[in-house]
Amino acid sequence: MSGLFEPFQLKGVTLPNRLVRSATFDNSAERDGQVSQRQLTLYGNLAQGGVGLVVSGIVYVHESGRVAMRQNSLADDQGIPGLAKLVDAVHAHGGKIAVQLFHAGREAARFRQFTGGEPAWAPSLVEHDPYFEHPHRAMTAAEIEEVVAAFGAAARRAKEAGFDAVQVHGAHAYLFAQFLSPHANRRDDQWGGSLDNRLRLHLAALDAIREQVGPEYPVMIKLGLADGFEPGLSFDDGLEAAVRLARAGYDCLEISQGLRGADYRASEFRPEDKRAEQEGYFRAWAAEVKQRVSVPVIAVGGLRTPAACAEVLDRGQADLVALSRPLISQPDLVARWQEGSQERSRCISCNKCMEVIIKGKALSCILDQEPSAA
Ligand SMILES: Cc1cc2nc3c(=O)[nH]c(=O)nc-3n(C[C@H](O)[C@H](O)[C@H](O)COP(=O)(O)O)c2cc1C
């Protein structure tokens, strides 16, 4: 099959194929954030199932950016040995693994209610926000610097644990997307206002990371290209942001949703749309970015068949393709495609996997349960 199963060079790292497991939070760490046996099995299964590059779920880099009790941490050195085992579980099957470095920004508010009730850190306090109603406050400049330094320190720990790359979470509802969005970022200092200022966090984090990991280590970013409502981050600004981040030295861009809008259709995990002209709802965005940057681009969102994945590569819309929900349901899907199966993933994008997580349970697929539960 065209290209999909050819190796790909991400700086010095050779990926065995072009299929990526997009970052997927599994809510399965131990209660202190340590890697669990369940996670070792899950990650081992993904690599055994043929995924070329596994991107971890959100790993918090600073306590203020944590969203769940059972979330892995790189906020201090204690997580390193456990995460090194996670790396080994993937490497044992010939796969590569990146860790997703994360700060929730204002989205940490719900978790903070259980841990002392401090308002969450955000670019700005936005009152009467129709898309966000939990307690949050504007970060001080010193707090922003603290978080920037935390990204650098976390990347150092990731490299020590043996990860092949890091990916900064710059998409969806979280801190970097909040800073990039003129809706969530109302600051009038150097961290807000113009596009340059709204991108300062992304660039400062890159500098802090590079200082710790050196020039050769792959530093990726998952970038939200536009918010799911207006007026928010516009597509034009998102595109320009992608160009600047690639030029600044991010080594790979995965293209996704910015801040979420009113429902799943304006989020990164969109429902199935039978009327859609083509499978893969962000691939046109990825293609626009791909035309303008010289670093690799990853397409994600709604890809369900090997034919569509191959077509993304054939048409030059992206260099790599990523899946999340299908691999929750079928961790061995890629291996079956590699053996020649043309089957469509059984995933129906029902988002029950996300709802399970929101309820505080470990990641699962409803299709694995008794038929009566579906
Ligand atoms: C249960 C669940 C957890 C997710 N966790 C993350 C995450 O930790 N980081 C992230 O960037 N995206 C996360 N996502 C979004 C996916 O990576 C992906 O961008 C999105 O689901 C669209 O791809 P898909 O149609 O292949 O599922 C998650 C999605 C789901 C359903």
Image (cartoon, helix red, strand yellow):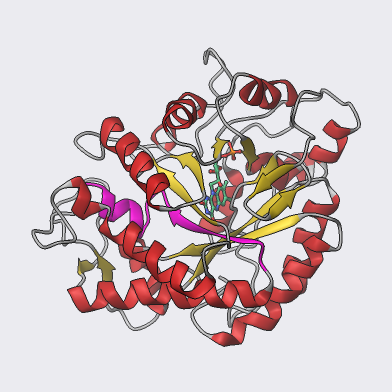
The answer to which image quadrant residue 156 occupies is bottom right
Q: Nearer the viewer, residue 250 or 179?
A: 250
Q: Quadrant of the N terminus?
A: top right
- Residue 131 pos. (x, y %): 27, 47
Q: Residue at x 72, y 66 (%)?
A: 39
Residue 50 as seen in the image, left or right of residue 29: right
Which residue, as the protein is rendered here, is positioned at the far bottom? 78
268 drawn magenta: no
- Residue 222 pos. (x, y %): 47, 48
Residue 9 as seen in the image, left or right of residue 148: right
Q: Is residue 110 above or below residue 235?
A: below
Q: Residue at x 52, y 16 (%)?
A: 276
Q: Nearer the viewer, residue 109 or 292?
A: 292
Please indicate, yes or no, whether residue 132 appears anywhere in the rendered image.
no
Residues rendered magenta in the picture = 163-183
Q: Nearer the viewer, residue 193 or 130?
A: 193
- Residue 201 pos. (x, y %): 30, 61
Q: Is residue 296 above or below residue 215?
A: above
